Image (spheres, helix red, strand yellow):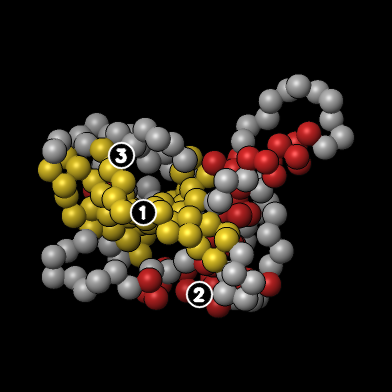
Amino acid sequence: MLKLVVHFLHRKASLLPCHPDVIPDLDLYPYDPWDLPGKALQEGRQWYFYSRKTQERVTSNGYWGSVGIDEPIFTSSTHKKVGIKKYLTFYLGDSQTNWVMQEYSLPDSSSRSSKRSNRGSTSSTHKPDYSKWVICRVYEQNCSDEEDDDGAELSCLDEVFLSLDDLDEVSLP
C-alpha cells in the first residue's frame, strides 16, 4: 500500500511521469463495480484505477458509502504520513452489497500546493488542483473469503515494485 501511494499517487498528483504507466484514469462514478472489467487494471477479481476525489459517489444503480474510519499511511523509516486509506462499500438502494472499494488519497496538501503555485507569480489565474487524485482498489468480498490481506493487495503490481528502488527513501513532493 505504501508503494502504491508513494510511487504512483504522489507522482500522478505532482504531474510527474510514472513508469511503467499501468494504472488507467477512470471516472468511477458513472460505473457500477461490475462494469469495471476492461476499464481498470485488473488482477483476478481486483481492479485498480486513478480517479478524482469527490464527495459524489453515485452511479446509475447505487452509491458508494464510507465505512469505518480513515486509516493513515506512514513510511516505515521516517513515520511520515504519506497517504490516507478509506473503505467504502457499494449499496443498491438501501441494501449493502459485497463490493468494497479502498480509496487511497494524499494527506491534505492545499497549503503546499498553494505555496508552490504562488511562488514567483502575482497572477490570479487558477490552475487545476492535481492533488485531488486518488487510487482506487475495487473488489467483491465473498462471505467465504478470509480477512482482507494487505500483503497480497498489490499482486498485480509486484513485478513493477520489484524493479523499483527502495521507495521509503524517495523524497516526496
> Which of these two is toward me, 156 or 93?
93
Q: Which mark is residue 159?
A: 2
Amino acid type, callout 3: Tyr
Q: Residues within 10 Å of mark 3 (few under 14, many from 20)?
A: some
User: Of marks 2 and 1, which one's residue comes earlier in the chain?
Assistant: 1
Give the residue type that dot 2 points to: Glu
Residue at x 48% of width, y 55% of height: 84
State the CA–CA distance, disc 1 to disc 3: 25 Å
**Circle 3 is placed at which residue position?**
31
Q: Residue 171 or 29: which is nearer the viewer?
A: 171
Helix, strand or loop at label 3? It is: loop
> What residue does disc 1 label?
69
Q: Nearer the viewer, residue 154 or 39?
A: 154
Q: Position of residue 115 (x, y in %)?
A: 75, 40
Q: Are marks 1 and 3 in contact (CB under 8 Å)?
A: no
* Identity of the residue drawn at 78% across and 34% down: 118
